[in-house]
Image (tube, rainbow, N blue to C red):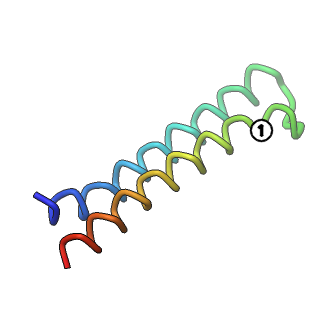
Amino acid sequence: MLGTVAVVAPFIGLFGTVVGIMTTFRDVARQGQAGIEVVSAGVAEALVATAAGLFVAIAAVVLFN
């Protein structure tokens, strides 16, 4: 079970990253501009998802080993 979590968690984080970047592109297209205010929210969401996935994966690998 821990091995599976360790392998799958980074992909879940990557999926969150892709969704966050897609949100950013959608917001930029909707606003018609790419200012820091528009881009920062989606990028922050993507980075949080990536960090969470890596945190879970690293913890699972440590526990597994």
Determine the residue located farthest toward the left in the rendered image: 1
- Residue indicated by mark 1: 39
| For residue 51, above or below residue 21 | below
| For residue 21, above or below residue 53 | above
Determine the residue located farthest toward the top in the rendered image: 30
Determine the residue located farthest toward the front in the rendered image: 63
Where, by quadrant of the figure, is residue 24 drawn?
A: top right
**Is residue 2 or residue 45 the one in the foreground?**
2
The spot of residue 62 in percent (x, y) is: 29, 74
| For residue 45, above or below residue 8 | above
State the residue at coordinates (52%, 56%): 51
SS under mark 1: helix
**Count of marks overlaid on the render:** 1
The spot of residue 31 in percent (x, y) is: 81, 21
Inspect the image, locate mark 1, and give the three-letter code of the amino acid beneath it.
Val
Where, by quadrant of the figure, is residue 6 drawn?
A: bottom left
State the residue at coordinates (57%, 36%): 22
State the residue at coordinates (50%, 46%): 49
As drawn, is 56 to the left or to the right of 36?
left
Where, by quadrant of the figure, is residue 60 drawn?
A: bottom left
What quarter of the picture does the N terminus occupy? bottom left
State the residue at coordinates (31%, 55%): 9
As drawn, is 11 to the left or to the right of 52?
left
As drawn, is 33 to the left or to the right of 41?
right
Q: Within 10 angstroms of label 1, few (less than 14), some, or many (20 or more) residues?
A: some
What quarter of the picture does the C terminus occupy? bottom left
The spot of residue 38 in percent (x, y) is: 81, 32
